[in-house]
Image (spheres, grey):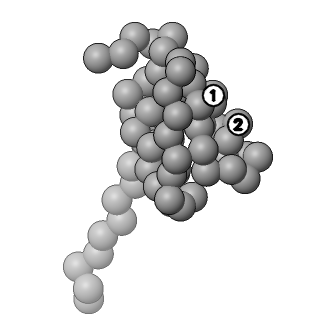
Amino acid sequence: MADTDQLLAWREALLRARYAGTRTVECDGRKVEYRSDSEMASALADLERRLGTSPRVTQVRINSSKGV
């Protein structure tokens, strides 16, 4: 598995490419071409999950009634 610095570098490269509107990402001598923005979003979500930077749910509210 990649270390944190490498994951951060991949994430930054992916974000730069996505914001520039390109589908090709180059990082550490590797070149990856994505087919769509949703595929890039999926890769970005996976990187954020691995880094633990995705937003966490901190509060859940439950509302119920008896239906009467």
Residue type for callout 1: Glu
Query: Which label number is shown at residue 27?
Result: none
Which residue is at the far right?
Answer: 20
Q: Residues within 10 Å of mark 1 (few under 14, many from 20)?
A: some
Residue pictured at 65% horizontal, 38% vertical: 15
Q: Residue furthest left?
A: 66
| In the displayed structure image, the side of residue 66 where residue 24 appears, left or right | right
Q: Secondary structure at mark 2?
A: helix
Residue 6 image point, x, y percent: 48, 15
Residue identifier under label 2: 16
Local SS, label 1: helix
Q: Of residues 52 and 12, which is closer to you in this image? A: 12
Q: How many marks?
A: 2
Q: Give me the residue at 70% from left, 36% from top.
A: 16
Q: From the image, which quarter does the N terminus lie in?
A: top left
Q: Quadrant of the C terminus?
A: bottom left
Give the x, y percent position of residue 29: 53, 21
Query: Alpha carbon of mark 2 to alpha carbon of mark 1: how far?
Result: 6 Å
Q: Position of residue 41 (x, y in %)?
A: 52, 51
Which residue lies at the image location 61% right of the left edge and 50% below the top edge?
23
Residue 30 appearing in the image: yes
Front in this rendered view, residue 6 or 28: 28
At x 63%, y 28%, the residue is: 12
The residue where tag 1 is placed is: 12
Residue 64 lies left or right of residue 13; in this view the side is left
Under mark 2, the amino acid is Arg
5 w.r.t. 64: above or below = above
Q: Position of residue 10 (x, y in %)?
A: 53, 26
User: Are the residues at dot 2 and dot 1 in contact (C-beta closer than 8 Å)?
Assistant: yes
Work out whether 14 lies above or below 27. below
| Number of other residues with Cα within 10 Å of mark 2, as a class: few under 14, some 14 to 19, many 20 or more | few
